[in-house]
Image (cartoon, rainbow, N blue to C red):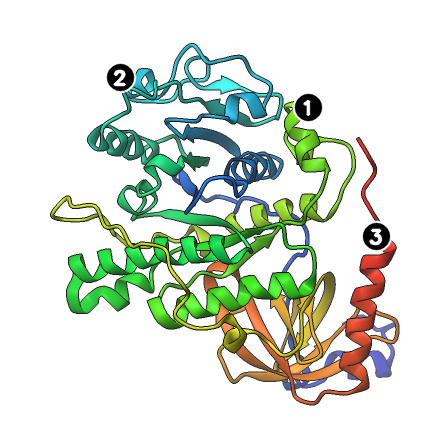
Amino acid sequence: MSERQSGSERARLSQPAARLRRLRVMTSGRWHPPLGRRRGATLIAVGAAQPGVGKSIVASNLAAAIAGLGRQVVLVDFDLHSPRQHALFGLDSPAGGLAAWLERKRIRRDEPARATSVRNLRLLPSIEPADAPLSAGRRRAIVDELYDLESDTVVVVDIGNDNRDDLFECFGTRAMRLLVTARTPAALEATYAFLSSAHVRARRRHGDDAAAVLENFCGGLVGNSTDTPEEVETLHAFARLVRAHLGIPLPVFGALRTSERIPQSIVARQPLIVRRGVDDNVRAFHHMAELVMSEDADLERECPLDSDDGDDVIVAAGPLPEDLAGYTRQYARHSVDWAATLDLGTVVTSVRVRDVSESGAGIETSMQLRVGDKGVLRLDQLPGQPALPVAVKNVMPAARRVGLGFATRGDASARLVAAARDALAEAGPAPRD
């Protein structure tokens, strides 16, 4: 120690280490690939239980958002009867397709995978004629080849409604399965019936181990046309019902609002997120991209749901087993994007607050928390930096989401909800294209 150093400074530096608290920081910025880590191809399968719910729009914009994070992305149009991806990206009808690629046994940067106007994003289109569809065996062979793509490639697969069972048949390992649905009763009933077929498949194939296999279901729900906090809560209630009755963890990965900018992007033949202006839907796609690229979402999870006997598993759509009101929170959640810290006493970690209600908050964190953990949530970004005692109510590892409940409800929680509403009002509509 230098002779010039004061006694008070020496005393400060010699304070017991027990008084120091570890600070874990989770960046609230965009995803970055881990240094020095070689990653295999990541598969994200996007499907829907019925047509017309925006599946292809979700697939194209999600692929573009992931490409914006710096990853090499291949978007595969697996909609064999109504391919749309080439039109959504402003490309002419393809001269090659899945069958040609299957013969080559690998994706090449020239043909048939085609460059798009989005940096880092290529498209593998589908041109299979409707009267001569690919057999189930050839479709499975294509998916097997997708798993073997070059390191650090992200493959986003748009699965057609006519071959929607491929979501369960062909993506049982190292794949994330996203299911797109509208919030209407008919759409939710069709989605529940589709997920019920996965439950039946698991029981037929795995018997007593079916519940454990379904726990490995890596995926999430994407809702469309959800314009109010109450409508978004309908999706969360549906996800809770699915978990309770079918044993399938299906967190809500994103909720899109009704917007004239979406049909405008279709007419312009350009993904929404690369056009001028930022709105709630653009933010939602960027957030989904970050979630699916998270470390937890990239884990290899075995959840084979193909049928051993080859028989189709069809569950007819019908009324939900229970009223969603029984799974709906008393207080609607309001979407936000706030920086905060969670003080657990011995550890302080930075978190990202994604929604708030008068009863609690949803956060994202890289730290592993357990139900029952208690701490103090400090809203660093808000005036006065309010601090609220919280307890962990639920944990969704695949989405890096943690649900916190406020220990007490009162003026502090009411002010949070008011701040969330004010933020939404100040954001206003996005610029017109």
Q: Amino acid at mark 3?
A: Ala
Q: Which residue is mark 3?
A: 427
Q: Residues within 10 Å of mark 1 (few under 14, many from 20)?
A: some
Q: Residues within 10 Å of mark 3 (few under 14, many from 20)?
A: few
Q: Is residue 17 left or right of residue 159?
A: right
Q: Is residue 411 above or below residue 208?
A: below
* Quadrant location, the C terminus: top right
Q: Position of residue 17 (x, y in %)?
A: 64, 82
Q: Is residue 54 above or below residue 215?
A: above
- Marking on residue 268: 1
Label 1: element kind: helix
Label 3: element kind: helix
Q: Which residue is mark 2?
A: 103
Q: Amino acid at mark 1?
A: Ala
Q: Position of residue 285 (x, y in %)?
A: 62, 45
Residue found at the very far bottom of the displayed protein: 408
Q: Position of residue 167 (x, y in %)?
A: 34, 44
Comparing labels 3 and 1, the label whose residue is closer to the camera: 1
Comparing labels 2 and 3, the label whose residue is closer to the camera: 3
Q: Is residue 326 above or below residue 86?
A: below
Q: CA distance from mark 3 to mark 1?
A: 25 Å
